Amino acid sequence: MAANGDANRISLADASALGLPELVREAEAGREQIIVRDDKPVAVVIGVERYERLQRREDLADVPEPARAKTRPGSSDAAGSRFRRVDPNAHPVLGRWRIVEMSMFDSDYIDLVEPGFIAFDPRGQGEFAFGAVTASLDLWYAPSSIDFTWRGDDEGDDVFGDGSAEMDDDGDLIGEIRFGYGDETEFRARRWSDADAVGDLRSRL
């Protein structure tokens, strides 16, 4: 980690390896964590007292959008603005999605053990499964997309990494799943429906 004022900059993969409990302990102790992907800050982990102080700063809510975009990347002010404007309960990508394409894997591998899927909930958690990989997710909500870190199992081996997802113009979910050892795969998914579940079951009988 590289220090940056009162906060530490840490990659999504390192944050996943460190674990959510340790990130929370650091935030409670007043040490903020700036989560970085591709050298770009994407989220901040802060203590609740600091968060509540940011919420009380009404001047941030009145700043026009173009000016707010010029706020120094990774600053606590910018983070506080994003926290207030995103309602996880109304996020457009919440729910369960059926993975239909992956750039690294064919459809037989995607559905090797069970139908491949990825799912997000409003409590900051999610999961995915494809091939022999199963994982749980920790989520960061942006207005129209979700970033996440993940940790899971691949045929008995511990695996971890990070990723992102957003909806395209056709209503499909598109994104990337990146592994801690360097591999990454793009994916496309569609809303999981009861009809999809029945079709997947019949195809396996």
Image (cartoon, rainbow, N blue to C red):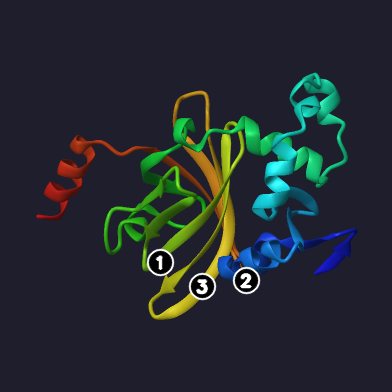
**In the rendered image, which residue does mark 2 sit on?**
22
Q: Gap between marks 2 and 1, in whole Å?
A: 25 Å
Q: Are marks 1 and 3 in contact (CB under 8 Å)?
A: yes
Q: Amino acid at mark 2?
A: Glu
* In the foreground, 113 or 75: 75
Q: Nearer the viewer, mark 3 or mark 2?
A: 2
Mark 1 and mark 3 lie on one chain; the one further toward the N terminus is 1
Q: Nearer the viewer, residue 179 or 19?
A: 19
Location of residue 183 in the rendering, given as x and y in whole percent from the top left corner: 60, 64
What residue is rendered at 15% in x and 42% in y?
Answer: 198
What residue is at 69 percent from the left and 51 percent from the top?
Answer: 49
Q: Can the viewer see residue 43 in this picture? A: no
State the image coordinates of residue 37 (x, y, percent, origin top left): 72, 54
Identify the residue under disc 3: 159
Coordinates of residue 125 in the picture (x, y in percent): 46, 53
The disc labelled 3 sits on which kind of residue? Val
Q: Are marks 3 and 2 in contact (CB under 8 Å)?
A: no
Residue identified by numbered label 1: 133
Where disc 2 sits, the SS reads helix
Q: Is residue 4 above or below residue 85?
A: below
Left or right for 41, reference 105: right
**Numbered circle sitting on residue 18:** none
Type of amino acid under label 1: Val
Of residues 151 and 27, which is closer to you in this image?
Answer: 27
